[in-house]
Amino acid sequence: MARLAGPAWWERRAHRSVLRDLCERRVRSPADARARAEALGLSAFGHRLFAVLIRHTRTGTEDDHLDERIAKELAQTGIRALVGETAPGRIGVLLTLAQVSAWQPVAERIGRLAREELGRDCVVAVGSGVTDLSGIARSWQEAEQTAEAITSASPDVGR
């Protein structure tokens, strides 16, 4: 019933909690991870899952509600995702796409939105696609490593 009324503060907090647990491998079982994700509207079965990481240097109230704006933009285009701050300066996006859908246009849309909101100093990185939530931690790690490589190679980015 609450989901019909629109997103609430507790739903954004739940997104953050699930994302952090998945990327830090703190879930009890694959069934638990799937149940938690599906309770938040993310269908994991029969879809490809992608971890998208947005790294930025904004602090304090500057980035308040950015995760909400990204989630809203994705939802308006029919893309199902969990979006939330996973650590200071990091916003995680867990995308679920149909097996035949291309992930690149979605990643590009997230990148454009992040640049509009955060400026050119943000980095958007995507991990490899997986077919089960048990592999999403690896996708997060790949996205994190890619973001770190981009930041290290570009002295003007993310500093």
Image (tube, grey):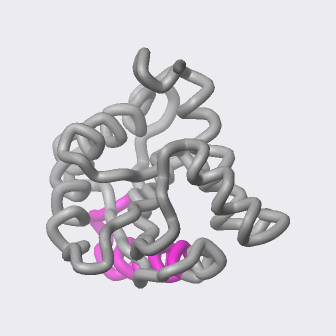
Residue 131 place in picture, x, y as percent: 49, 81
Q: How many numbered callouts? A: 0
- Residue 62 at x, y percent in the picture: 40, 28
152 or 79, nearer to the observer: 79
Q: Can residue 55 be spotted in the picture?
A: yes
Q: Residue at x 30, y 63 (%)?
A: 157
Side of 72 where 104 appears, left or right: left
Residue at x 46%, y 60% (from the top left corner): 94
Q: Is residue 153 magenta?
A: yes
From this view, report whether residue 145 is shown above or below residue 17: below
Residue 77: quadrant of the picture: top left
Q: Magenta segment, principal secondary structure? A: helix
x then y, percent, for residue 68: 39, 33
Q: Does 33 sit left or right of 153 as displayed?
A: right
Query: Is 42 a magenta residue?
Result: no
- Residue furthest to the top in view is 5
Q: Tell me the residue at 36%/51% (across/down).
A: 80
Residue 147 seen in render:
no
Q: Is residue 109 left or right of residue 66?
A: left
From the viewer's perspective, is residue 19 above or below residue 51? above
Q: Which quadrant does the C terminus fall into?
A: bottom left
Identity of the residue drawn at 48% across and 58% down: 43
Residue 21 position in % (x across, y down): 71, 58
Q: Nearer the viewer, residue 143 or 79?
A: 79
Q: Which residues are magenta?
A: 139-159
156 lies left or right of 59: left
* Residue 63 to residue 61: above or below: below
Q: Nearer the viewer, residue 128 or 151?
A: 128
